Amino acid sequence: MKIKRNTINKKVVISAIFVLALVAGFSVFAIVSNRPTPPAEDLNQTANIPTDQDKAPATTPPTDETSDSPKTPIENDKQDTPPAGTVVTTITSVTTYDNEIKISSLIESITNTGTCKISLKKSGVVVTRSSGIQALPNASTCKGFTIPRTELPDGVWTITLSVTINNKTGTATKEYEIK
């Protein structure tokens, strides 16, 4: 007399494991894909990365939608471009620390040659500095300006940045209050 053992076919076991793995995979996918992603605006703000909108000149919205503009719609959408022979530059930050003030900039061309000159003016007091230019992957920047706090008394200062690259010049101005 033979004793029969209940043996499960190997093919059935392998098939069951395969089905369970598929179900687990789809479950993980469903959970991960339902998570909300943060808006792009939040990502740029947290990283302090200037966006194309930050670099674009501000335009004023039309006050009346039915105005009779002599420009075609395409001309109305065009942004003003800087004149030829100029360098587009921006003062991106002015930061006051305990003993010094740091000023950073952005130049909308990629180069490591040229000069940056900064001038801070207030009530007849003028403080000037100069630096070189360093290239970044998509733009350039002045190598930076650090001014001792002792040279800048409290008050509102007019900061003027002049950038010269290959006989082309660009200027940016910003008001900053030192407290």
Image: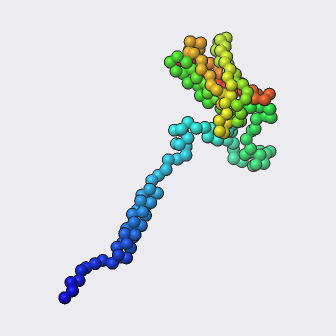
Q: How many marks?
A: 0
- Determine which quarter of the picture holds residue 23: bottom left
Residue 175: quarter of image? top right
The residue lying toward the viewer, choosing from 2 and 151, is 2
Vertical placement of residue 71 versus 112, above or below = below
Q: Is residue 19 above or below residue 138?
A: below
Q: Pick the quarter of the image with the N terminus.
A: bottom left
Across and down, in percent, residue 78 comes to: 74, 44
Q: Is residue 58 visible?
A: no
Q: Residue 86: x, y in percent?
A: 77, 31
Would residue 47 appear left or right of 62 to someone viewing this image?
A: left
| Residue at point 67%, 11% (across, down) | 124
Q: Quadrant of residue 49?
A: top right
Q: Residue at x 56, y 12 (%)?
A: 150
- Residue in the foreground of this view, choosing between 125 and 140: 140
Q: Residue at x 66, y 13 (%)?
A: 126
The residue positioned farthest toward the front in the image shown: 1
In this view of the protein, which residue sits in the foreground, 33 or 21? 21
